Amino acid sequence: MKTIKQRISYVVMGLMAMGFTACTQNEDMAPTLKGQEINATFSVGGMQTRVNTLGDGENWEDKDKLKVSIFTDSDPGNAAFLSFNGETWSRTGSFRWLNGYEQHTILAVYPSDTDFGKNNLQYDLQTDQSSEGNLKNADLITGYWYDIPLSYYVDIPMKHRMSLVTIVYHVGTADYPNMDISEPQVYSKHNSVDFSRDQARGQFVMSTPTANPAWVQACKHDDGKFSAIVIPGSYIKDEIFVRFKIGYQNFHAKMKSDTNFQEGERYTYKLDVGKDKVELTRISVDDLKGWDSNNEEDLK
């Protein structure tokens, strides 16, 4: 038998792949998958899952971490942690087929410190997203795979589970000369939500959120924008959705009518602030690789 060789591959061909290279065996021996390393690709939106949350979804970033768990009904399995150092991936823990005949479940979660088990996942919204690092850490992404091992290679589709809100704002210079927005916040209808494993649908399914609402401290970025991740939920007309300060003065903007945020969608709004008005309107945006963003009508 050839020497067992273990590696994590990082390939960019329109699709970035994060993998584990399997052991090889002599050609004249029948291969067995039990105990073999798995070469896995974790993809989202047709591209490799990533956590450059404010970008287009194509690249992993330095110090990104992913937790991957594998198990069967008869074997509790194990978990592996992946870390990206800017060029290559490193791993702690084992990621192998437990046997060659039983249905395996593979769960992948970002951020890597998310609390999840075989059948359930609990997500608590991080309300301080005022830095880009904190915003990234609120970007819940899950992957699910359930099947009998047939190959060294598997593709595990990843899915954004939260809603991303981006506000493009303009402050009237005549009304507020040399002044900018500070302490921006976005309203989330809930601060926690549970997921359950659904084998038939091949995914973690979000329960109806029932936890308390929360104001999320948003991240200012790109000179005139701020963004926040919220738990999907329904908003009603005239509900305060955004609040902020200019100098010592407090402002807020309301929903124009009932609207419903969906999992994995990015909502972009234009916020115009003048002395006599604060106007919030949903605008069209380019599609991103990981976030859906076909929201062109006015804020509902």
Image: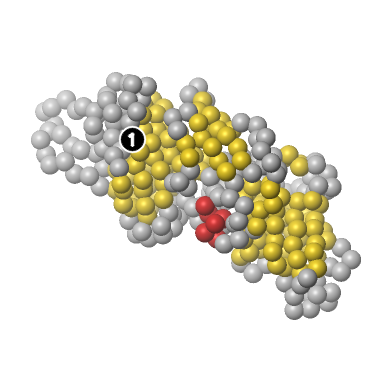
Question: Furthest-bottom residue in view?
Answer: 178
Q: Quadrant of residue 145?
A: top left
The picture quadrant where one finds residue 63 is: bottom left
The residue lying toward the viewer, choosing from 124 and 58, is 124
Q: Residue at x 80, y 62 (%)?
A: 251
Q: Position of residue 273 (x, y in %)?
A: 80, 65
Residue 75's spot in the image, x, y percent? 32, 25
Specify whether residue 66 is in view. Answer: yes
Q: Residues within 10 Å of mark 1 (few under 14, many from 20)?
A: some
Give the side of residue 174 with respect to residue 67, left or right: right
Residue depicted at 53% across the width and 54% down the height: 136
Q: Secondary structure at mark 1?
A: strand
Extreme residue toward the right, this view:
276
Quick one: quadrant of the N terminus? top left
**Residue at 69% across, 41% down:** 212
Q: How many marks?
A: 1
Q: Is residue 92 left or right of residue 300?
A: left
Given the image, on which type of amino acid does mark 1 rest?
Asn
Say if residue 265 shows up in the picture: no
Q: Is residue 103 above or below residue 92?
A: above
Tell me the residue that label 1 is attached to.
Answer: 78
Q: Residue at x 18, y 37 (%)?
A: 24
Q: Position of residue 224 (x, y in %)?
A: 68, 67
In the picture, measured across the screen, residue 223 lies left or right of residue 200, that is: right
